[in-house]
Image (spheres, rainbow, N blue to C red):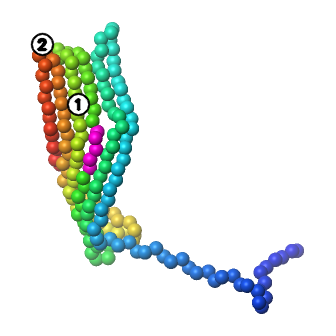
Amino acid sequence: VFMTSNAVADGMPRRATMVAPTPPPTPIWTGFYIGVGVGGAFATHDHSADLNGLRLFDDDRGDARFFGTVTVGYDQLFSSRWVAGVFLDYDFGNRDSDSRFPVLGPLTDVHLSHEHGHAWSIGGRFGFLSSPTTLLYVSLGWTQVSFDGDVSFSLGGTQHSRSFDLDRDG
């Protein structure tokens, strides 16, 4: 039988004493916060159809797009496990699409386009800390989204067009 173990002799260096790691700081749930985010979408979808040499439609959606968001808010911890707060979000980007239909029933040279401009939200949240780092919450808010759209077509040789600038709330 062969056996080994550490031996400590007088005058020999000893191992350093193990020191327990410092625990991470406790999260602070009361205060102001700000957040920013950016992203991109890179996709192209080109769809078209022909019937006996007649172009039925061209549908061009996508391209390199960007979007972003900015958030500001305030949360307040009350009691030992309850948090309430308010927030404001603003989202922006350059998403748009175009569709063309050379013939659509009695209409010719139909062109549809739309652009999503921006959106904003304001709201509040109320939650329970299930652990010092986990907030389970519900939120309630109001959002407004901005869309711009255009439609143009020919009917009986006369060109018609209409623009729509919509702000949807809810």
Question: Residue at 27% across / 75% down in the picture?
Answer: 78
Magenta-drawn segment: 91-95
Density class for disc 2 (Cα within 10 Å; few <14, some 14-19, many ≥20) is: few
Per the image, the residue denoted by label 1 is 113
Whether residue 43 appears in magenta in the rendering, the answer is no
Residue at the (13%, 25%) spot, across then down: 161
Between 32 and 94, which is closer to the camera in this rendering? Answer: 94
Give the amino acid at mark 2.
Answer: Gly
Q: Is residue 50 visible?
A: yes
Q: Quadrant of the N terminus?
A: bottom right
- The quadrant holding residue 150 is top left
Seen in the picture, residue 27 relative to 97 is either above or below; the reply is below
Main secondary structure along the magenta-highlighted residues: strand
Q: Earlier in the sequence, mark 1 or mark 2?
A: 1
Which numbered disc covers residue 156? 2
Residue 140 visible in the current orientation: no
Q: Is residue 149 left or right of residue 28?
A: left
Q: Is residue 58 above or below residue 144?
A: above
Residue 165 placed where, x, y %? Answer: 15, 38
Inspect the image, locate mark 1, and give the three-letter code of the amino acid beneath it.
Ser
- Name the residue rendered at 27%, 29% in the picture: 98
| Image location of residue 144, percent across then percent down | 18, 48
Judging depth in this view, the residue of 138 and 52 nearest the camera is 52
Q: Position of residue 139 (x, y in %)?
A: 25, 59
- 6 in relation to 113, above or below: below
Q: Are marks 1 and 2 in contact (CB under 8 Å)?
A: no
Q: Position of residue 40 (x, y in %)?
A: 37, 44
Local SS, label 1: strand
Q: Quadrant of residue 85?
A: bottom left
Q: Mark 2 falls on what kind of element?
A: loop
